[in-house]
Image (tube, rainbow, N blue to C red):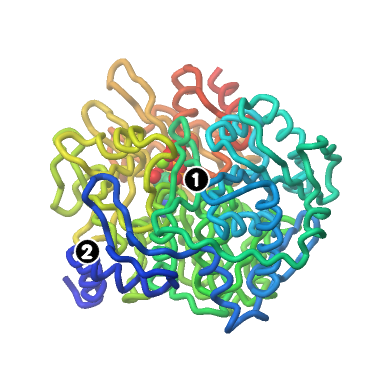
């Protein structure tokens, strides 16, 4: 191995082979009320208990701890391009607002271990509510704002919250989305009834309060202006929250996270992955409804003593320069977004990205789905800063694969999210035999040998059996955590994610990742975005079918132009991957079906292509995308 990788390799080795000493060091990055007695209890696999005997508090570490040194520094920068509002909260102000919210929750009887469901748009009060929960040892369960009432109802029934915190409405692309009617419907559907609903009234939509149940946040806040609510010290293993996965592959899973392990994992990630310093500014464009929002809008930047930008709005409204104008205004140093957002920007003039002074920005991290090379190159050319892919899951809470530039600067290889992060004992496994694949460039399931590092899910909420069966028993002959993603690793340890295990296509005995074909098609200059799925084929078992969004739809009006481009794409796949990978059809569409977290819903595409029922679509962003495709397929 060359020197440019040696230090990191040693760091990673120590994290696995000298696990307890390694994590004992990382644990010093946070403050404990009682230090842990045992670093990792792995006596009952696959359940890992981290920092046993330690007591701490997530809110103390995110807020109170910084008051001595940076009370007057910005902590939360809440910006809405939807309502035109912008407000900076210092650490002292955040501390006060969180205590007010905590006092309100306590006034409705919320105690340690109780759940509070948060159904909110991206406004500061959502952050107050999350921090208020962990301050008093209650678990938050954030449900993506604007989810349909039926999805919300099942989550209410699962979490059984004592209190729900919500708002009159969210806003998206200038359109008000009333939340209160959805919440009322969900509560009517749900067999569980909360003690109280706390409603933040933004004055966007009429929201009738049901007497006895619903309360106006502004009025409650007035009653608790001087609230002093001390942090409740909880065991490191006390759950901090539950959160559902995106639901890309089916019924979402309720991930349960601990307190101490999560705080340590995030604090360590800020040092080793993000090279963050107190006083800097972090702008993560995700939503608090997703894990990226939990970890990198709320907790990690605050744990690191940074200012965090919370943004409500689209990346292209009022124009495609909006994010970069915020970078300029707040001297943002770290930016975190998703490939799906970059693809939205890619359809705009790159000049918008160059109009603003972004010299404060150190790098852009992207996660959530595969970052194809053409998209990575495009954003890299437009911004001229390092673009760093990172791969992880709701389940893990922080990156599994990326570059740990804080340990040792490593070169990016576009198309790869990087190497196994310290703490993760990542293996590639042959699904059929359960054997480990150790040679470079072999394809297999990306799996993680237990124990999972701190910060990862403790279990599935109220369903230990599902945790064990789903994640740890899918690979024959061994107890190992499956990510359900398929990948390869090169000789230097860089991984490439080839798609989800469900999406692997089997053409006449050849196994192909959908990702490989997508990457090839996305490289065509006329294609903005593409999805490939395997479709049942009587002759070959399966064949690939491609759904491509052209960059210039106007140029594809007539059938001859479409056929010419389709033929060109097929030739390209033939040349790069071979004839087995060639799609049987390339359909040109305006929109691809995605989850609200921006992930391609391949299973829905596949079902429609095979003329089956697309199944549970409650987490889908825009049903029009699927209808258009159904119409085209006839
Ligand atoms: P569900 O588990 O409910 O089907 P989901 O897997 O989409 O939904 P998330 O936890 O939000 O829910 O997404 C994690 C998945 O996203 C990963 O398992 C992987 O498939 C994909 N992913 C995330 N980041 C990357 C990345 N950088 N490169 C490739 N794929 C990624
Ligand atoms: Mg998943």
Report the residue marked by disc 1.
242
x then y, percent, for residue 395: 40, 47
**470, 500: nearer the viewer:** 470
**535, 114: nearer the viewer:** 114
Label 1 CA crowd tier, 10 Å (few <14, some 14–19, many 20+): many
x then y, percent, for residue 101: 69, 57
Label 2 CA crowd tier, 10 Å (few <14, some 14–19, many 20+): few
- Direction bottom: furthest residue: 69
Asked where in the image residue 12 lies, by quadrant, the reply is bottom left
- Point 40% across, 65% down: residue: 264
Does any portion of residue 372 appear in the rendered image?
no
Residue 616 appears left or right of 180: left
Where 146 falls versus 320 (above or below)?
A: above
- Label 1 SS: strand
Report the residue marked by disc 2.
492
Does any portion of residue 23 appear in the rendered image?
yes
Where 611 falls versus 307 (above or below)?
A: above
């Amino acid at each position: 191995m060359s020197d440019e990788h040696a230090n990191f390799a040693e760091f990673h080795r120590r994290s696995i082979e000298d696990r307890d000493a390694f994590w004992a060091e990382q644990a010093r990055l946070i403050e404990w009320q009682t230090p842990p007695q045992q670093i990792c209890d792995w006596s009952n696999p696959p359940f890992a208990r981290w920092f046993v005997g330690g007591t701490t508090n997530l809110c103390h570490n995110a807020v109170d701890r910084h008051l001595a040194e940076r009370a007057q520094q910005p902590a939360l920068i809440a910006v809405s391009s939807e309502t035109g509002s912008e407000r900076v909260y210092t650490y002292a102000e955040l501390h006060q607002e969180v205590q007010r919210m905590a006092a309100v929750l306590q006034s409705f009887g919320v105690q340690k271990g109780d759940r509070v469901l948060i159904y909110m748009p991206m406004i500061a009060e959502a952050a107050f509510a999350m921090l208020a929960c962990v301050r008093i040892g209650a678990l938050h369960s954030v449900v993506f704002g604007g989810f349909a009432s039926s999805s919300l109802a099942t989550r209410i029934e699962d979490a059984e919250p004592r209190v729900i915190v919500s708002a009159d409405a969210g806003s998206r692309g200038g359109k008000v989305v009333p939340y209160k009617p959805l919440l009322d419907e969900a509560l009517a559907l749900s067999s569980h009834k909360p003690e109280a609903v706390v409603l933040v009234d933004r004055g966007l939509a009429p929201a009738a309060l049901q007497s006895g149940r619903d309360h106006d946040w502004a009025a409650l806040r007035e009653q608790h202006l001087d609230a002093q609510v001390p942090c409740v010290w909880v065991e490191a293993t006390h759950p901090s929250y539950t959160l559902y996965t995106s639901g890309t592959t089916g019924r979402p899973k309720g991930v349960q996270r601990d307190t101490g392990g999560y705080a340590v994992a995030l604090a360590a990630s800020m040092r080793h992955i993000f090279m963050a310093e107190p006083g800097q500014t972090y702008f993560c464009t995700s939503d608090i409804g997703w894990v990226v929002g939990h970890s990198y809008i709320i907790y990690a930047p605050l744990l690191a003593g940074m200012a965090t930008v919370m943004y409500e709005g689209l990346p292209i409204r009022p124009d495609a320069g909006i994010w970069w104008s915020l970078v300029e205004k707040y001297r943002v140093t770290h930016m975190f977004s998703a490939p799906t957002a970059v693809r939205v920007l890619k359809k705009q003039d790159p000049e918008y990205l160059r109009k603003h002074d972004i010299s404060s920005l150190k790098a852009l991290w992207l996660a959530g789905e595969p970052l194809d090379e053409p998209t990575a190159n495009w954003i890299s050319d437009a911004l001229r800063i390092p673009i760093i892919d990172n791969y992880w899951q709701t389940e893990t809470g922080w990156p599994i694969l990326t570059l740990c530039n804080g340990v040792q600067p490593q070169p990016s290889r576009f198309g790869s999210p990087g190497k196994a992060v310290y703490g993760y004992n990542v293996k590639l496994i042959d699904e059929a035999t359960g054997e480990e694949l150790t040679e470079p460039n072999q394809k297999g399931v990306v799996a993680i040998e237990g124990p999972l590092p701190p910060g990862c899910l403790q279990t599935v909420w109220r369903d230990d059996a599902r945790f064990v069966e789903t994640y740890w028993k899918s690979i024959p002959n061994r107890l190992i955590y499956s990510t359900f993603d398929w990948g390869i690793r090169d000789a230097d340890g860089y991984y490439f994610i080839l798609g989800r295990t469900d999406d692997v296509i089997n053409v006449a005995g050849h196994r192909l990742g959908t990702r490989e074909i997508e990457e090839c098609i996305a490289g065509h200059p006329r294609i903005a975005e593409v999805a490939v799925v395997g479709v049942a084929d009587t002759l070959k078992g399966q064949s690939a079918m491609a759904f491509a969004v052209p960059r210039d739809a106007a140029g594809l009006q007539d059938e001859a132009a479409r056929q010419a481009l389709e033929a060109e794409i097929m030739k390209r796949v033939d040349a790069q991957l071979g004839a087995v990978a060639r799609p049987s059809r390339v359909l040109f569409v305006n929109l691809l079906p995605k989850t609200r977290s921006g992930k391609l819903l391949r299973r829905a595409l596949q079902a429609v292509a095979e003329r089956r029922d697309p199944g549970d679509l409650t987490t889908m962003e825009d049903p029009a995308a699927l209808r258009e495709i159904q119409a085209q397929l006839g």
